[in-house]
Image: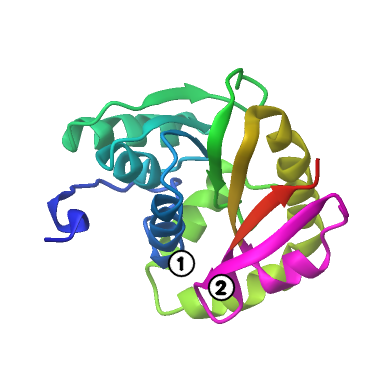
């Protein structure tokens, strides 16, 4: 039986919902079989909880107190231990990991109000339009955020560590660093995929 069928999750306005991108990111992470993982921007906690169910030791961080509360409830519902704590990206992250995963927000300048609006839009017939338009509306800020994640993640990865990100194809074309290799692991939506980032040391 698929482990997904045994899991229970609550969702709440303002916290990113569990969607195809979240599930694909988690499934991709599982294939790398790393026992020490950081879930950056955990949201509902789905990725962290599923990976903990697979036996990984998982730390999960978020800048949203609502998200951390939601993830904590979901961890209890699924009877797993994950270490949850507040962090603005890597600011409060001190350890090193074999794998860091993240599904960066579409709008890097998100606010609690905008998050709640998007929560309801994702559950409506407008969802596909939102996915299509987002990279055009927020591309500049989003690419800046992704570059920041890539640069800062290196300090918290061990020597063979991997960074996995859910990105728009347009994001990838605008990433600046020449000191990384980017490999597409799988498609998610028509314009997005899961990408493996490794560093040229």
Residue drawn at (67%, 53%) of the image: 197
Left or right, 145 with reference to 65: right
Q: Is residue 140 above or below residue 146?
A: below
Residue mark closest to the camera, 2 vs 1: 2
Residue 161, quarter of picture: top right
Left or right, 24 with reference to 103: left
Residue 56, quarter of picture: top left
How would you rate the neighbour count of disc 2 (Cα within 10 Å): few for under 14, some for 14-19, many for 20 or more?
some
Residue 181 lies in magenta, yes or no? yes
x and y, in percent, of residue 79 in the image? 17, 31
x and y, in percent, of residue 16 in the image? 45, 51
Residue drawn at (62%, 30%) of the image: 158
Q: Earlier in the sequence, mark 2 or mark 1?
A: 1
Judge whether residue 130 can be spotted in this image: yes
How would you rate the neighbour count of disc 1 (Cα within 10 Å): few for under 14, some for 14-19, many for 20 or more?
some
Residue identifier under label 1: 121
Q: Which residues are magenta?
A: 167-194
- Disc 2/disc 1 C-alpha distance (Å): 8 Å
Residue identifier under label 2: 130
Q: Secondary structure at mark 1?
A: helix
């Amino acid at each position: 039986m698929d482990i997904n069928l045994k899991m229970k999750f609550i969702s709440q306005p303002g916290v990113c919902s569990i969607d195809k991108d979240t599930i694909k990111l988690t499934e991709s992470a599982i294939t790398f079989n790393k026992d020490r993982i950081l879930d950056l921007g955990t949201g509902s906690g789905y990725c962290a909880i599923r990976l903990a169910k697979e036996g990984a030791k998982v730390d999960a961080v978020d800048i949203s107190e609502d998200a951390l509360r939601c993830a904590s409830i979901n961890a209890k519902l699924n009877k797993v231990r994950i270490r949850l704590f507040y962090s603005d990206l890597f600011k409060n992250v001190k350890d090193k990991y074999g794998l860091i995963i993240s599904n960066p927000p579409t709008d890097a300048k998100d606010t609690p109000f905008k998050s709640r609006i998007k929560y309801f839009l994702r559950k409506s017939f407008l969802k596909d339009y939102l996915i299509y338009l987002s990279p055009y509306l927020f591309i500049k800020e989003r690419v800046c955020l992704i570059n920041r994640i890539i640069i800062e993640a290196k300090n918290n990865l061990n020597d063979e560590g991997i960074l996995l990100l859910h990105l728009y194809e347009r994001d990838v074309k605008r990433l600046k660093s020449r000191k990384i290799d980017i490999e597409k692991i799988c498609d998610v939506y028509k314009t997005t995929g899961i990408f493996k980032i490794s560093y040229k040391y």
